[in-house]
Image (cartoon, grey):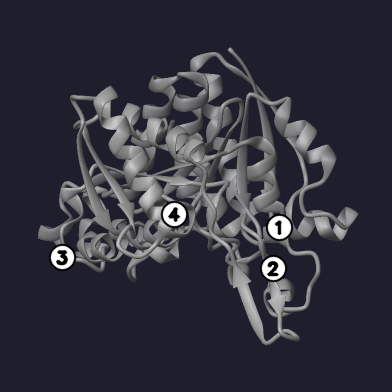
Amino acid sequence: MKLNIALLAGDGIGPEVIDQAVKVSDAIASKFGHEINWTPALTGAAAIDAVGEPYPDETHDICVNADAVLFGAIGHPRFDNDPSAKVRPEQGLLKMRKALGLFANVRPTFTFPSLIDKSPLKRERIEGTDLVFLRELTGGIYFGEKGRRDGGETAFDNCVYTREEVQRLAKKGFELAMTRSKRLCCVDKANVLETSRLWRETVQAMEKDYPEVEVSYEFVDAVAMRLVQWPNSYDVLITENLFGDILTDEASVISGSMGLMPSASVGTNNQLFEPIHGSYPQATGKNIANPLATILSAAMMFEMAFGLKEEAEAIRAVVNKSLAEGVVTEDLAAGKKAYGTSEVGDWLAQNV
């Protein structure tokens, strides 16, 4: 199979971890008889520096014409520390999601047997955790009207959702639940927010179309608490943009490191795969960043974008082997030998 993949390395550690995902993907392609055509493109601070725009038209064209997009990370301290900056890397991320129609962020949380005791939570609380968040990605407060008034003394950010936006995200949640344990949790704040009441009534109306799925409705603050008390009580969770942003980062530490969790952002016509961590500027160029989340995102890409489940499982198997044998970066080394980012990538590619 010929796989045409747009490659957006981005900023910070993005290029370093993307390089390792390319190594492993190329090794998988060689083993299984595929041909990958990688097309690099600029985004984030790197794109601002080059062309003054965080998501250039050329990058968009490359993404639209690709079968899938593999993405690193964006962000740079010089923008983080300048509240007056008119152009920001994160604007490119939001623009990309909207322009590509990536309305559903699929973010799994699971544990690794060899790392179960590295989690900040007790073994008995997290053993067996295997849940998936579907976060709505192109609506809500991040895309609502925002601004200042009263001479800059008052700020506002509007949260707006349409029923159609809720329905298309919930549909993916129901469909995913049908392939798993047939349990779906709708996360909202319907006791306070009108948008959450729209979410709840919309999902309730869809229940009749999926009679086999057991649906629960929980407030976001209760879910935040239960994620650290009893995470394996959840399977598939759906929620709006802001709640999903916060809860998925909370859930990510269950595994023991944010450097381990992959994700996918999907729409009707386009699919993008990325690690959940940020650009981690403090580690840039030091060859210490954990590439496993990006490599596992490539595994999701093989399975979801191309239907190549065996190839995806081969990546997950070699990642588990590297964890079991201690071929890991410093965030997981726990006083033992730490391998560099590129060394981990080389080892994985050689052991595919």
Q: Within the image, what quadrant is residue 351 found in?
A: top left
Q: Nearer the viewer, mark 4 or mark 1?
A: 4
Q: Earlier in the sequence, mark 4 or mark 1?
A: 1
In space, the residues marked 1 and 3 are separated at their CA atoms by 38 Å
Under mark 1, the amino acid is Gln
Which residue is identified by label 1?
A: 91
For mark 4, what is the residue? 195
CB within 8 Å, label 1 to label 3: no
Name the spot of residue 329 as percent of width and height, x first.
45, 59
C-alpha separation, residue under disc 2 versus residue under disc 1: 12 Å
Asked if residue 343 lies left or right of residue 312, the reply is: right
Choose mark 1 or mark 3, whichever is in front: 1
Q: Position of residue 152 (x, y in %)?
A: 72, 84
Q: Decide: marks 2, 1 in contact (CB < 8 A)?
A: no
Amino acid found under the numbered disc labelled 4 = Thr
Q: Residues within 10 Å of mark 2 (few under 14, many from 20)?
A: many
Considering only order in the chain, which callout, 2 or 3, is on the residue closer to the N terminus? Answer: 2
Q: How far apart are the two marked residues, 4 and 1, measured between alpha carbons?
A: 24 Å
Q: Which residue is mark 3?
A: 122
Give the residue type that dot 2 points to.
His
Task: Report which residue position mark 2 lands on.
Answer: 76
Quarter of the image where the N terminus is located: top right
CA neighbours of label 4 inside 10 A, class few (<14), some (14 to 19), many (20+): some
Residue at x-position 50% and y-position 35%: 164
**Image quadrant of residue 317?**
top left
Check if mark 4's residue and mark 1's residue have beta carbons within 8 Å.
Answer: no
Q: Please identify, in this view, whether the residue under mark 3 or under mark 4 is nearer the observer.
A: 4
Camera-near label (2 vs 1) is 1
Q: Which badge, 3 or 4, is on the more N-terminal residue?
A: 3
Tag 2 near tag 4, CB within 8 Å: no
SS at badge 2: loop
